[in-house]
Image (cartoon, rainbow, N blue to C red):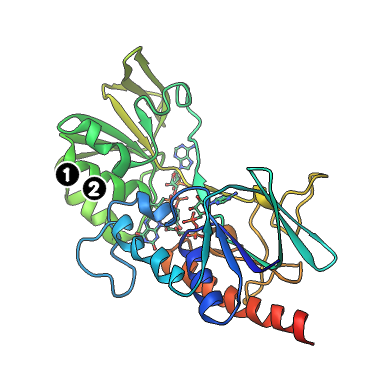
């Protein structure tokens, strides 16, 4: 029986792992289906994590975190969790390998995943010219032209990254103002090889057996433009990873918002005692590494108190 099971090994889960183990819980396992670090490892540059100065990538930032936790006894299972349920006072952790573990408390931090924009050909060419990760795939388009879709921080930051590698970046956004921070917008506007294609949405990405050859976009006036690029990067927001909380009867284990975020109080407590939710998946998440890490610490301190109360009082 674990004192605490942590689901997800991003900034939230890793920080929860550090604080639970260092705070005295004996048996804590973090379940992470891939390499620990979370979605920030896909980011080419992070400049707003306090103390991390200079040109550092998301991967650079996250590399030391797992070892720091393991030093205090955090165990890492590289396996996907399919479901978390609670019977009496015991949580059951259903794993993709068929095993079921048990825990007194659970901290969920499964984050979010890139959303599809929904234009024709996007799924067909995904992984063959359509991508959601500039650091992963940008190099394939070295000295070539690419298109970026979206107007948030991710789209603009990744457009800036791609502009350093590629000959030209077409930034396609459905409005004429950006959701991204003003500083980032100013940097994009100063970058000579980024062309803004505003008030426009992609209609279709097309290509041949080799991959993508172009993107057809339509502007608000109904004009069609063909942009001949071999690479299309979409950054149109994220959906919350809440699947582990779905029960056999299709209901959620705890209270959720209509858009699928976990409802928590300021202590990261959900509506189920002993279950905490952290990071991008919780209601009103600022979707920042520093905030996810903060959530992990808060949830861990609460989990320590919960387990102590459960076992000793
Ligand atoms: P995540 O980082 O999403 O981690 C969740 C982890 O859970 C993942 O590793 C996933 O594999 C794992 N997981 C999911 N489901 C399961 C399961 N069922 N079983 C086991 N494991 C599971 N924030 C900033 O502060 N500054 C930035 O500059 C910045 N840039 C960004 C750039 C990009 C390209 C992106 C995509 C995001 C950026 N963000 C930035 C946002 C930041 O990455 C997130 O807010 C943060 O990573 C959220 O942390 P998290 O721990 O909640 O979730
Ligand atoms: P986001 O802020 O939700 O922006 C998504 C963008 O995609 C918006 O501009 C949106 O247009 C556009 N869009 C949505 N659906 C579309 C569709 N179907 N077709 C075309 N365009 C579409 O997502 P994000 O940029 O990934 O950022 C997510 C969160 O992480 C934010 O809170 C962000 O601040 C944070 N983040 C922070 C940093 C940083 O601090 N440096 C870096 C990256 C991300 P509209 O604007 O018209 O809605």
- Relative image position of residue 6 (x, y in whole percent): 59, 63
Mark 2 = which residue?
160
Q: Could you tell me how far apart the alpha carbons at marks 2 and 1 are, in whole angstroms?
A: 7 Å
- Relative image position of residue 152 (x, y in whole percent): 39, 50
Which image quarter is the C terminus in?
bottom right
Residue that protrudes farthest toward the bottom in the picture: 313
Between 46 and 89, the one lying in front of the other is 89
Residue that protrudes farthest toward the right in the picture: 88
Label 1 Cα neighbours within 10 Å, binned few <14 / some 14-19 / many ≥20: some
Task: Answer with the quarter of the image where residue 223 lies.
Answer: top left
Q: Looking at the image, which residue is at 33% across and 57% down?
A: 58
Q: Looking at the image, which residue is at 20% across and 61% down?
A: 55
- Identify the mark at residue 199; answer none if there is no mark: none
Q: In this rendering, does residue 302 appear at all?
A: yes
- Identify the mark at residue 164; answer none if there is no mark: 1
270 on left or right of 21: right
- Relative image position of residue 24 (x, y in whole percent): 57, 82
Q: In this rendering, is residue 134 above or below 35?
A: above
Which image quarter is the N terminus in?
bottom right
């Amino acid at each position: 029986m674990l004192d605490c099971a942590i689901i997800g090994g991003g900034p939230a889960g890793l920080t929860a792992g550090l604080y639970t183990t260092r705070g005295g819980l004996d048996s804590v396992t973090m379940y992470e289906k891939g390499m620990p670090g979370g979605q920030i490892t896909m980011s080419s540059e992070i400049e707003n994590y306090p103390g991390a100065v200079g040109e550092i990538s998301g991967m650079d930032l996250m590399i030391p975190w797992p070892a720091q936790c393991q030093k205090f006894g955090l165990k890492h299972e590289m396996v996907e969790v399919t479901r978390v349920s609670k019977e009496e006072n015991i949580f059951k952790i259903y794993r993709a390998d068929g095993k079921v573990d048990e825990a007194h408390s659970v901290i969920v931090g499964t984050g979010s995943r890139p959303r599809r924009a929904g234009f024709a050909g996007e799924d067909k060419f995904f992984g063959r010219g359509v991508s959601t990760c500039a650091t992963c795939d940008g190099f394939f388009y070295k000295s070539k032209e690419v298109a970026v879709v979206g107007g948030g921080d991710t789209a603009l930051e990744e457009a800036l990254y791609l502009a350093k590698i590629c000959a030209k970046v077409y930034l396609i956004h459905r409005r004429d103002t950006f959701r991204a921070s003003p500083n980032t917008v100013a940097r994009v506007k100063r970058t000579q090889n980024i062309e803004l294609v505003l008030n426009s949405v992609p209609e279709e990405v097309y290509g041949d057996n080799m991959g993508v050859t172009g993107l057809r976009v339509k502007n608000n006036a109904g004009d069609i433009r063909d942009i001949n690029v071999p690479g299309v990067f979409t950054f149109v927001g994220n959906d919350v990873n809440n699947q582990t909380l779905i029960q056999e009867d299709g209901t959620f284990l705890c209270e959720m918002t209509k858009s699928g975020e976990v409802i928590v109080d300021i202590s990261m407590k959900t509506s189920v005692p002993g279950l905490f939710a952290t990071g991008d998946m919780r209601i009103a998440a600022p979707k920042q590494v520093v905030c996810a890490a903060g959530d992990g610490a808060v949830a861990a301190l609460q989990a320590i108190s919960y387990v102590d109360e459960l076992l000793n009082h």
